[in-house]
Amino acid sequence: MSGMWRPVSGAVLAAGLLTTACGGGGGGSASPDAQGAGPRVSVENCDGEKATFASPPGRIVTSNASALEMLLRLGAGPKVIGTGFPPGKGALPAELAGQAADVPVLGRTVIPKEKLLGSGADVYVQTFRPANGTSTGPRPEEFDAAGIKVVELLSTACAAEHPGPQKDLSAVMGDIERLGTLTGTSERADEIVAGMREKVDAVGERVAAVPEADRPTYFVFDFDAGTKQPSAVCGGQVANAVITLAGARNVFRDCEGTFEKTGWEDVVAKNPDWIQLTVRNRGSAEADEKAFDEAERFLTSFPATRGLTAVKKGRFLRIRSERMTTPSVANAETVERIARTLYPDEFQDVR
């Protein structure tokens, strides 16, 4: 997927000025500027350092399609002067795709350091931190020299350091609120978050009566991550929150960080009730379905998995990676989609 990287550690904490570094909710702060130039804007990253601006910055570069989509939904698209990992064809709703197409692509994957530093940006919105041991991105002193301040997303850039699993979407909602503060679009951010919260709360009311022990177990099969050694979605990942809110139990919720390579013997031992087939955006519904078909054929023919309960009963969900593993408004929509599939009787009155 455009933007589906694999930092074994990564999670973000772009916390608001008055929130704790690893907390959810709240949103940066805006206060009158002493010089009368406009409201000062401050957001806090997961290491506790604040990115402070004399007024909402007007030139933004995003690291990937996830951060770009949030800014477009906020109405801040004109402020975005470049992005890395641009959204692929069909990745965004039609009303956003045209705006995204107007954003200059500074890198088809990670933006080259020289291009990022020379972009003229005031702020770089970073969805994921570079994986441990890599040195592809600019150093803090290089960002400073270029006049670029880094703002990290709450839900992903520092997720691996977050204590305990993500069980709700407060971190994602916090990202939207902070970007609203950053761009002077807080009113729109509040509307978006309210809509997400309403959808998630409605699902919660319908599945609340199901005891934790009775909730179905759930495995995310990331087909594009490879079939030789499956990739586990751990508790620190946004997807764990989506699964939990939908009334299911991620079979790998107890592994630390965000993603972890595992073995098929571990999947077999957990014998999930449901399996989500996950692929990255292929550019069209037809191409996506072809990839989903391939993923399903693998599970139904592979000796280690064809005897699993979910496989024998055909309990598969087909959901693209972008809707689960990166922060997005789509996370709330996916909560509802999973819940409707797992608890059809609870949604009979909903079209």
Image (tube, grey):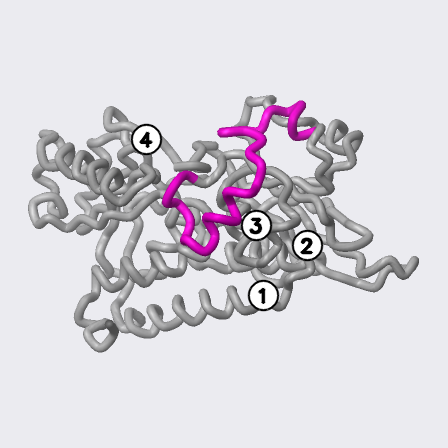
Q: Nearer the viewer, mark 3 or mark 2?
A: 2
Q: Earlier in the sequence, mark 4 or mark 2?
A: 2
Quadrant into which the C terminus falls: bottom left
Residue occupied by mark 2? 182
Residue extent of the magenta highlight: 88-117
- Graded by Cα atoms within 10 Å as few (under 14), some (14 to 19) or many (20 or more), the crowding at tag 3 reads many
Q: Earlier in the sequence, mark 1 or mark 3?
A: 3
Q: Earlier in the sequence, mark 4 or mark 3?
A: 3
Vertical arrangement, residue 238 with respect to residue 332, above or below: above
Measured in 3D between alpha carbons, the distance from the residue under mark 3 to the one under mark 2, in whole angstroms, is: 14 Å
* Identity of the residue furthest to the right in this view: 35
Q: For the residue marked with disc 2, what is the amino acid?
A: Leu
Quadrant into which the N terminus falls: top left
Q: For the residue marked with disc 1, what is the amino acid?
A: Arg
Residue 89 image position (x, y, % from top left):
39, 40
Q: Secondary structure at mark 1?
A: helix
Q: Are marks 1 and 4 in contact (CB under 8 Å)?
A: no
Identified at 62% across, 68% down, the residue is 187
Residue occupied by mark 1? 188
Q: Earlier in the sequence, mark 3 or mark 2?
A: 3
Residue occupied by mark 4? 225
- Residue situated in front as seen by the camera: 286 or 236: 286
> Left or right of 160: which side holds 148?
right
Identified at 15% across, 50% down, the residue is 315
